[in-house]
Image (cartoon, rainbow, N blue to C red):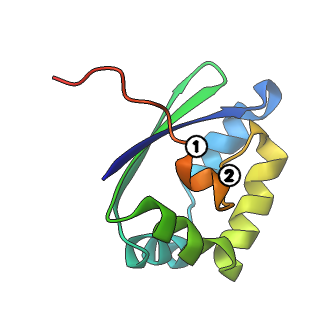
Amino acid sequence: MRVALHTKVRADRVAEYEQAHREVPAELTEAIRAAGARSWTIWRSGTDLFHVIDCEDYARLLAELEGLPVNVAWQARMAELLDVVHDYSAEGSSAGLPQVWEL
């Protein structure tokens, strides 16, 4: 399944956000893959961030990552940089952007 998300980086933290993503811990990327993600891409337009996640089951992905210490630490770091964060709660598993069109 593919899920599209929208988050928002703080205008004064864009450079830090991009730097953090050049340094994503291998332990975290391994955990994301183990939780069923095949790919996760983020695009930025100004302060708007658009994520596309290709995964087996998005709800399972969130559930497996939510309490994982490496992800908890990463989400704390991201919370300092973002105005709108990625929602790891059960409600967040249905918070993807609605698909409007596909070729």
What residue appears at the point 58 percent right and 72 percent down from the top-left corner? 63
**What kind of element bears circle 2?**
loop
Label 2 Cα neighbours within 10 Å, binned few <14 / some 14-19 / many ≥20: some
Q: Is residue 36 left or right of residue 84?
A: left
Residue contact between numbered discs 2 and 1, judged by CB atoms under 8 Å: yes
Residue in the foreground of this view, choosing between 75 and 63: 63
- Kind of residue sitting beneath label 2: Asp
> Which residue corresponds to the image point at 72% horizontal and 60% vertical from the top-left?
75
Location of residue 101 with respect to 49 vertically, above or below: above
Residue type for callout 1: Ala
Which quadrant holds residue 95? top right
The label number, if any, that marks residue 43 in the structure image: none
Q: Position of residue 41 (x, y in %)?
A: 41, 45
Is disc 1 surrounded by few (<14), some (14 to 19) or many (20+) residues within 10 Å?
some
When asked about the image quadrant of residue 62, the answer is: bottom right
Q: Quadrant of the C terminus?
A: top left
User: Where does residue 38 sit, x and y in percent of width and height?
Assistant: 30, 62
Measure the C-alpha gap from mark 2 to mark 1. Answer: 8 Å
Q: Position of residue 37 (x, y in %)?
A: 37, 64
Q: Secondary structure at mark 1?
A: loop
Q: Residue at x 54, y 72 (%)?
A: 28
Instruction: Say whether residue 5 is left or right of residue 68.
Output: left
Q: Residue at x 55, y 77 (%)?
A: 64
Q: Which mark is residue 87?
A: 2
Q: Position of residue 30 (x, y in %)?
A: 44, 77
How many numbered marks, from 0 up?
2
Q: Nearer the viewer, mark 2 or mark 1?
A: 1
Mark number displayed over residue 95? 1
Residue 91, located in which quarter of the rendered image? bottom right
Instruction: Judge left or right: residue 25 versus residue 88.
Output: left
